[in-house]
Image (tube, rainbow, N blue to C red):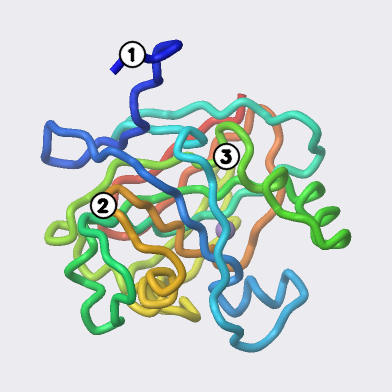
Amino acid sequence: MDYLFNPPAPASVPVVGESRQFPVQRIYCVGRNYEEHAKEMGFTGREPPFFFLKPANTLVVVPEGATGSMPYPSQTANLHHEIELVVAIGKGGKNIAAANAAQHIFGYAVGLDMTRRDLQNEMKKLGRPWCIGKAFDHSAPIGPIVPVAQAGDIEHAEISLQVNGTDRQRSNVAKLIWNIAETIEHLSAAWELQAGDLIFSGTPEGVSAVVQGDVLVGQIAGLPDLKLRIG
Ligand code: MN
């Protein structure tokens, strides 16, 4: 195939205990999937899950043990962290029942759904798409993927985020409003999932702003920490 210019290599994420990379297709994100976070954003109750996307090239891939770097983005004065469990899809499918969801999961990683909250809030007010608040360059830092068999009891794992050594977010994956299997059921009813898709499953309460120079450490029990400096 002849291209007009060189296509970039596919985005990919390292896999713990494996020399081959996980090639990334789409990045789906679930909105308001922990009750206390929904409340802090001004919502209550269980609503059907809703989704937005980030381009695969928004990933900031941080190898195990390294400190990644994310440039402070343009046009915002309110860059928020959202620590999230990321589900890596290894086998595609559509209309996947929750009971069968597990066989489609390759593994898990720690991710950050970085958000230009001021821009997102403006778009919400105007009823416009969230892209500018959510899907900007470098908005999806992620650590290595741990295959399911090595990830332990991820459905009951503690999830937390520290900024400069101080706790900002702390919860448990068990508090997801729509658990991983239910999320896959809903998502695969709207899109045919593909191997290589990532799902950022939502953030617990405690989202807040970071500034240039801050060091973030995201932790989910059973997965390598995600360490990131805002440059
Ligand atoms: Mn999020």
Q: In the figure, is residue 190 to the left or right of 64?
A: right
Q: Name the quarter showing ligand 1.
A: bottom right
Measured from the top left, where is residue 196 in percent x and y?
A: 29, 48
Q: What residue is disc 2 on?
A: 195
Label 3 vs 1, first from the N-terminus: 1
Label 2 vs 3, first from the N-terminus: 3
The residues bearing labels 2 and 3 have C-alpha atoms spaced at a distance of: 22 Å
Measured from the top left, where is residue 41 in percent x and y?
A: 73, 69
Q: In the figure, is residue 61 to the left or right of 163?
A: left
Q: What residue is disc 3 on?
A: 139
Q: What residue is rendered at 36% in x and 71% in y?
A: 184
Q: What residue is rendered at 47% in x and 33% in y?
A: 57
Asked if 2 appears above or below 164 in the picture, the reply is above
Asked if 104 appears above or below 79 in the picture, the reply is below
Which of 206 and 77 lies nearest the eye of the viewer?
A: 77
User: Quarter of the image holding residue 104?
Assistant: bottom left
Residue 224: give its label.
Answer: none
Badge 3 amino acid: Ser
The reply to whether callout 2 and callout 1 are in contact (CB within 8 Å) is: no
For the residues carrying marks 2 and 3, which lies nearer the camera in this image? 2
Q: What residue is disc 1 on?
A: 2
Badge 2 amino acid: Ala
Question: Crowdedness of circle 3 by 10 Å Cα count: few (<14), some, many (20+)?
Answer: many
The reply to whether callout 2 and callout 3 are in contact (CB within 8 Å) is: no
Label 2 vs 1, first from the N-terminus: 1
